[in-house]
Amino acid sequence: MILFLFLFQSAFAIDKEEIYKAYINGNMSQWKLLIDEMYQQNQNSNDYILELINYQYGYIAWCIGNKEYDLAQYYLDKATTKLEILEKEKYKLTDVYAYKSAFIGYHIGLNLYKAPFIGNKSLKFANQSIELDRTNYFGYIQLANNLFFRPEVFGGSKTEALEQYLKAQTLIEKNSDLTDQNWNYLSLLVAIARAYEEMDKFDMAKKYYIKILKIEPDFKWVKDELLPALNNKLK
């Protein structure tokens, strides 16, 4: 039993490290491959399922951003099925509700006409996640995303979104285990930088891009695209 747990934890750590490398190198083909390999492992532990959902969450966002809509829908369906398992088990419901919020956002990204009908559900689940655990940074990220991408006429606010992103940053940085080679942490810092940029607070945006590169100098997206583009704006 002890050997099994050691092997399981080792595999878990390897998956996390490989996903992190794929993220900083912009290698989403490798990211997809790792997700598919995790499915083949057919692990049924709730922790394993939750980690898999997190990787799907990241990959689906990339697919939508790059107009790979069929792939996004495919993995969104698979992730939703896994999430339903955790919800039935009542396992870490603060995370389950956060992902439910995110996945509704993805459905809107794939079908914009759904926004008036299901947009409030996304907000509701984000708030439920926070109510269950006010120390869970991930719930604040989903609340921030909801406020950031929601049109102002429907209650969106980039200012309020930034406040929630910053709350998430404060919470995640209280735990060094959550900031060490964690793609979610870098993604959050990028979201903050881009929020500042959207609000024309370019100096703050640059401050965050520099912070990111101090943490991870090899982060290609920031190093090769986001920071150079901001520097061009500042010229």
Image (cartoon, rainbow, N blue to C red):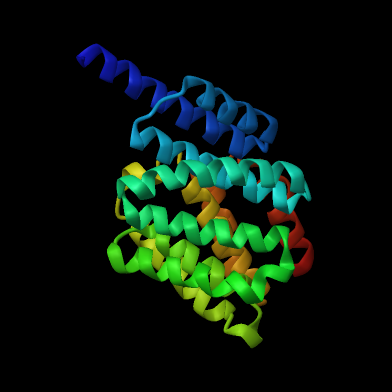
Residue 207 seen by the camera: no
Residue 39 seen by the camera: yes
Out of 70 and 231, give the one closest to the viewer.
Answer: 70
- Image coordinates of residue 225 in percent, x first then y, are 74, 50
Q: Is residue 66 left or right of residue 85?
A: right
Answer above or below: position of 141 versus 216.
below
Q: Quadrant of the N terminus?
A: top left
Q: Is residue 78 left or right of residue 44?
A: right
Extreme residue in the bottom direction: 153
Out of 181 and 91, give the one closest to the viewer.
Answer: 91
Answer above or below: position of 177 versus 8.
below
Residue at 44% over, 66% down:
125
Q: Quadrant of the C terminus?
A: bottom right
Out of 109 and 30, give the one closest to the viewer.
Answer: 109
Residue 113 appears in which quarter of the rendering? bottom right
Extreme residue in the top direction: 3
Out of 27 and 32, give the one closest to the viewer.
Answer: 32
Q: How many marks?
A: 0
- Image coordinates of residue 107 in percent, x first then y, are 64, 59
- Image coordinates of residue 110 in percent, x first then y, are 71, 57
Residue at 47% over, 54% down:
99
Residue at 55% over, 70% down:
146
- Image coordinates of residue 134 in percent, x first then y, are 29, 65
Extreme residue in the left direction: 2
Residue at 63% over, 57% down:
106
